[in-house]
């Protein structure tokens, strides 16, 4: 019998760790499947999906810059994908193309299960107001924090996002200048500033004494945001590698109905960075 086919699509895609992660999940759970990384030309996502499906493809992960394309192409959307405005997981079956987003649940599982952070009644600050941040707001608000503040360089994007999610909890948007004098239990860096080695302009002394800082980016070394967090005395300084593996685990669960163990895969990936 041919193996069930899965892939991740993006542009660029060569750097993707998803094939390694899903191969590890498949081996661990005894599932027979193939998972490849596919470079798709900008504007060619619908054609690629059609062809992949015609060739027996069962599911796709979707990464930069195609998460909005996937959202538009999906014929059915999960509630969380509907609100996030982005899709990173497509299931291809007889009923059509179903879209979901697992980034947010991936982050929350990493924070709650892997790092034992209890966010109920806590003050959370999120830096950035792009696609990744939109995807994490609903699952974070479901944890009932005291408040969630979004700070962004372009302030209107932060206030707009806060408006879009205000029915789910106490959420506000502002600029970086407005943070002086505030105190937070958790800061999540969801900007792409770390990619270029930049740090959003954060005031000193905004961390509570037991605060954690989380950069959604990951790498072999600390990002500038993580370095800043250590200088400010954060108790926990974390990167986004666990989020990456957890979002993959949730996709795997959607496709295969089996939940893989993530700890060993995070450990293996960490050694390879
Ligand atoms: P977007 O391009 O949609 O948004 C980028 C955000 O970063 C915007 O809010 C932008 O502000 C802000 N920004 C960019 N440069 C700077 C800077 N120099 N100073 C301050 N703010 C800046 O990107 P995404 O939301 O898709 O991705 C954000 C990050 O999340 C990336 O680093 C990505 O790697 C990471 N990510 C990690 C995942 C994981 O599994 N670990 C999953 C998904 C994303 P403005 O609005 O003013 O332009």
Image: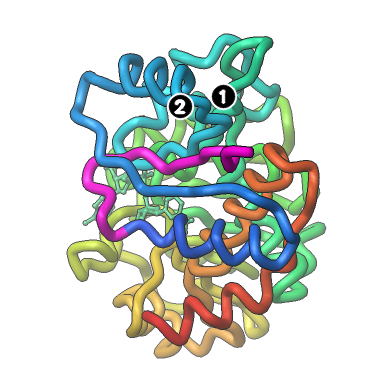
Q: Position of residue 252 (x, y in %)?
A: 66, 47
Residue 266 left/right relative to 254 = left
Magenta segment: 1-15
Real-space Cα distance between discs 1 and 2?
6 Å
The residue sitting at 52% across, 26% down in the picture is: 56
Q: Is residue 194 above or below residue 161?
A: below
Residue behind mark 2: 160
Q: Is residue 66 visible?
A: yes
Residue 155 left/right relative to 120 = left
Q: Is residue 179 visible?
A: no
User: Tell me, what colour scheme is on the image?
Assistant: rainbow
- Quarter of the image for residue 262 reads bottom right
Q: Secondary structure at mark 2?
A: helix
Q: Position of residue 44 (x, y in %)?
A: 24, 20
User: Marks 1 and 2: CB-CB under 8 Å?
Assistant: yes
Using the image as rendered, state which of residue 99 and residue 148 is in the foreground: 99
The residue sitting at 58% across, 23% down in the picture is: 92
Residue 109 left/right relative to 236 = right
User: Residue 35 colored magenta?
Assistant: no
Residue behind mark 1: 164
User: Residue 12 colored magenta?
Assistant: yes
The residue sitting at 76% across, 68% down in the picture is: 113
Using the image as rendered, state which of residue 187 and residue 90 is in the foreground: 90
Using the image as rendered, state which of residue 71 and residue 162 is in the foreground: 71
Q: Position of residue 183 (x, y in %)?
A: 58, 68
User: Which part of the image, by quadrant, shows the N terminus?
Assistant: top right
Task: State whether label 1 is within 8 Å of ligand 1.
Answer: no
């Amino acid at each position: 019998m041919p193996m069930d086919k899965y892939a991740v699509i993006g542009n660029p895609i060569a750097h993707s760790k998803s094939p390694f992660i899903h191969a590890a999940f498949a081996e661990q759970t005894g599932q027979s499947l193939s998972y490849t990384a596919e470079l798709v030309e900008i504007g060619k996502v619908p054609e690629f999906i059609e062809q992949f499906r015609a060739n027996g493809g069962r599911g796709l992960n979707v990464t930069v810059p195609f998460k909005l394309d996937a959202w538009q192409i999906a014929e059915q959307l999960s509630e969380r994908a509907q609100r996030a405005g982005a899709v990173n997981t497509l299931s291809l079956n007889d009923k059509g193309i179903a879209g979901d987003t697992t980034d947010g649940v991936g982050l929350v599982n990493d924070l709650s299960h892997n790092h034992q952070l209890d966010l109920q009644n806590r003050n959370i600050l999120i830096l950035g107001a792009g696609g990744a941040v939109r995807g994490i707001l609903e699952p974070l608000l479901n944890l009932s924090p005291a408040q969630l503040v979004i700070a962004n360089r372009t302030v209107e994007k932060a206030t707009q996002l806060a408006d879009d999610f205000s029915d789910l909890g106490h959420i506000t948007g502002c600029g970086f200048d407005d943070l002086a004098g505030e105190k937070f239990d958790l800061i999540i860096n969801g900007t792409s500033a770390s990619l270029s080695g930049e740090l959003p302009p954060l005031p000193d002394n905004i961390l509570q004494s037991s605060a954690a800082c989380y950069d959604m980016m990951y790498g072999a070394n600390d990002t500038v945001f993580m370095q800043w967090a250590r200088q400010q005395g954060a108790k926990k300084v974390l990167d986004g590698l666990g989020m990456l593996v957890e979002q993959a685990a949730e996709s795997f669960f959607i496709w295969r109905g089996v939940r893989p163990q993530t700890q060993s895969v995070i450990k293996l990936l960490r050694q390879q960075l």
